[in-house]
Amino acid sequence: MAFEEKAKPIVPQQPQAADELVSSLSNDSHLSAPSQKYSNDELKAGEVEPEISHTAPMELPLKPMSEYVTVSLLCLCVAFGGFMFGWDTGTISGFVAQTDFLRRFGMKHKDGTYYLSNVRIGLIVAIFNIGCAFGGIILSKGGDLYGRKKGLLIVIIVYIIGIIIQIASIDKWYQYFIGRIISGLGVGGIAVLCPMLISEIAPKHLRGTLVSCYQLMITAGIFLGYCTNYGTKNYSNSVQWRVPLGLCFAWSLFMIFALTLVPESPRFLCEVNKVEEAKRSIAKSNKVSAEDPAVQAELDLIMAGVEAEKLAGNASWGELFSTRTKVFQRLLMGVLVQMFQQLTGNNYFFYYGTIIFKSVGLSDSFQTAIVIGIVNFASTFFSLWTVEKLGRRKCLLLGAASMMACMVIYASVGVTRLYPNGKSQPSSKGAGNCMICFTSFYLFCYATTWAPVAWVITAESFPLRVKSKCMALASASNWVWGFLIAFFTPFITSAINFYYGYVFVGCLCAMFFYVFFFVPETKGLSLEEIQELWEEGVLPWKSEGWVPSSRRGADYDLNDLQHDDKPWYKAML
């Protein structure tokens, strides 16, 4: 529904009767539905997502990058939640190869050595993801009820409880298993609320870069987790794994302290009628005075959206499946993009890195894991540039194509060259080095494209009214597929070894085509402008040429972006 502004600066209007509101112009493309006039009953039933005004006569002024250091640091503090997730990924990959961990939680061979069965190692590693999936759906609701910051505080406390249970484990693997489920609940909530808060406080021209910092923190956690495992591996007691777990308390306390410095989401503040606080939050994020007319214009735009959403009442889970409002299309995109991020095969290397590189004949696979962590971490810095300069679509398309090439070479060398004289004989050092090299190329491509951009798209694509629910389901998709890959990888690699790489090649090919046909470009758009993009039904492969209604010239041809008479293969070229 459209709210009309007739004066500058924008002044919030009293909500009209829903029957008087007129829906925006639409069309029959796959991103839209035919234009209709909706009734008050339809609004309250949640069948319609109220539209907001797209007229924005005044933009927040752009300043030199040096002026945004403060807000960037604040967003980095929020993004530190990703470090806690990455730390778990980096440390657990080493725990499952450490002698004390195997002795306490594994089983004994006849020769007196200890080992973890495929089932047990799969459960210990992968159950964390199931906890994350439920945590994202259940605990992220605290962000709507109490605010993004208080919601984060709640999930961090849950995470700490899980860590305590793990550290207290002596020799019962199922106690450690339960602790990982509970800490996973906390990290799942973090994975929803951190990108959400960043996307709502970041200036729109920096939003992609700052949300990508969440992925940067994940890679930092993975890298330092690898380093910590390397530093403790020579101990013969529980120091090997309890020290890395104990450091989780330090990360949690830092996160709690950092949250005291971060402004609350202006969109949440508007929802609870704390308008002056919302104004100060906008001003702090954009380095302008709270009395700046542009701040008032931004606030009015947010308030218009909040008021429109209040017309329809509380959002229900059923609304997420409404095709008339494009929410379902966006939810499906978020779920599939997060699923595809896992199906790139990244966690094949991260969770089982030390085990994989033992199989290629390396004497100290912990050192190789550190090298991989460095490549992954350093590459993510490059993504802070690519996500805004290249845009979301190009990053995803280039990433899928380049990772596919790397995975083909990795798998082919592993299948045909690693064991030239059979698996019972020593492996080829040259082939092993080649595989490590292309693993590094693969991780560079992943870290600069799919790793950050999947979280960016999830954080910026959904209307405020259903945002937490949609982000929770999209994140749950990531966690569930992460669980499936982590749990079944030991069984699959035991059966088909490096042929497993070809499975990921097929997935990468599928995701390339999916992105081309179904993921629109959102670079440089505000959250309200992204809503307009979806409402107008712009074809994804033409979305880079889309301009918000507030910045269009008289000769702008929207119809050309909504239809394409070319065959699909010509559109790709």
Image (cartoon, grey):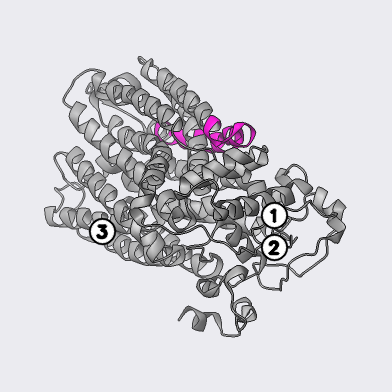
Left or right of 337? Residue 385 is left
- In contact (CB < 8 Å): disc 1 and disc 2: yes
Quarter of the image containing the N terminus?
bottom right
Q: Nearer the viewer, residue 76 or 35?
A: 76
Taking the magenta stretch, the answer to whether it contains residue 125 is yes
Residue plotted at (31% across, 47% down): 349
Q: Residues within 10 Å of mark 3 (few under 14, many from 20)?
A: many
Q: Quadrant of residue 125?
A: top left
Which labelled disc corresponds to residue 11? Answer: 1
Give, as a three-letter code, the residue at label 3: Phe
Percent from the top left, x then y, of residue 437? 20, 56
Element carrying mark 1: loop
Q: Nearer the viewer, residue 11 or 316?
A: 11
Can residue 90 be seen here?
yes
Element carrying mark 2: loop
Left or right of 340? Residue 111 is left
Q: Gap in Å between the C-alphas at discs 3 and 1?
A: 52 Å
Q: Quadrant of residue 30?
A: bottom right
Give, as a three-letter code, the residue at label 1: Val
Left or right of 514? Residue 437 is left
Percent from the top left, x then y, of residue 466? 66, 47
- In contact (CB < 8 Å): disc 3 and disc 1: no
Element carrying mark 3: helix
* Residue at far front of view: 291
Number of the front mark, 3 or 1: 1
Magenta-highlighted residues:
123-150
Quarter of the image containing the C terminus?
bottom left
Left or right of 395? Residue 10 is right
**Which residue is under mark 2?**
7
Q: Nearer the viewer, residue 173 or 392?
A: 392
**Which residue is under mark 3?**
441
Can residue 481 be seen here?
no
